[in-house]
Amino acid sequence: MYSANTRVEHQPWLEELEQAADRLELTGEARSTAADLFLANVPEADRSKPAVLAASIYAGSLVAGDGRTQCAVADAADVSRLSIQQRWKDLLAGAGLEPPKW
């Protein structure tokens, strides 16, 4: 879990998350889940934050049943698809959620 202070501290990143979610036309539930996943897993290094943000959006969309492709999320968040692929399952596992079994 994260504190309210964490939300305030990372507000600029949450705004980036909202912009990417707008481009993807995600539901409110997907956005909320993505924000929770991001805030619970914010890395120390700024260079790692865009990748975690994108992975959070991807995972949040899956959890909410509003799934988007890794490529679509990567384009919307301006990161590589590989950045998402390497992180999203760990984000779900850290939140106590099972990744889908396609």
Image (cartoon, rainbow, N blue to C red):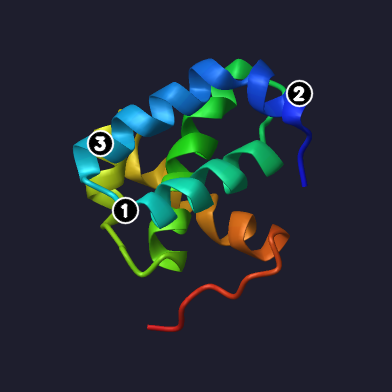
Amino acid bearing label 2: Asn
Residue 41 visible in the picture: no
In the rendered structure, find residue 16 and report the number of the disc placed on it. none
Amino acid bearing label 1: Thr
Residue 46 on image: x %, y %: 60, 17
Residue 95 on image: x %, y %: 69, 60
Q: Secondary structure at mark 2?
A: helix
- The residue at the point 56 percent across, 20 percent down is 11
- Cα distance in 3D space between marks 2 and 3: 25 Å
The residue that label 2 is drawn on is 5
- The residue at the point 61 percent across, 54 percent down is 91
Work out whether 17 lies above or below 100.
above
The residue that label 3 is drawn on is 22
Amino acid bearing label 3: Asp
The residue that label 1 is drawn on is 27
- The residue at the point 78 percent across, 34 percent down is 3
Residue 7 on image: x %, y %: 65, 27
Q: Secondary structure at mark 3?
A: helix
Q: Residues within 10 Å of mark 1 (few under 14, many from 20)?
A: some
Q: Secondary structure at mark 1?
A: loop
Upstream in sequence: badge 2 or badge 3 = 2
21 with respect to 6 (left or right) = left
- Cα distance in 3D space between marks 1 and 2: 25 Å
Residue 51 on image: x %, y %: 48, 35
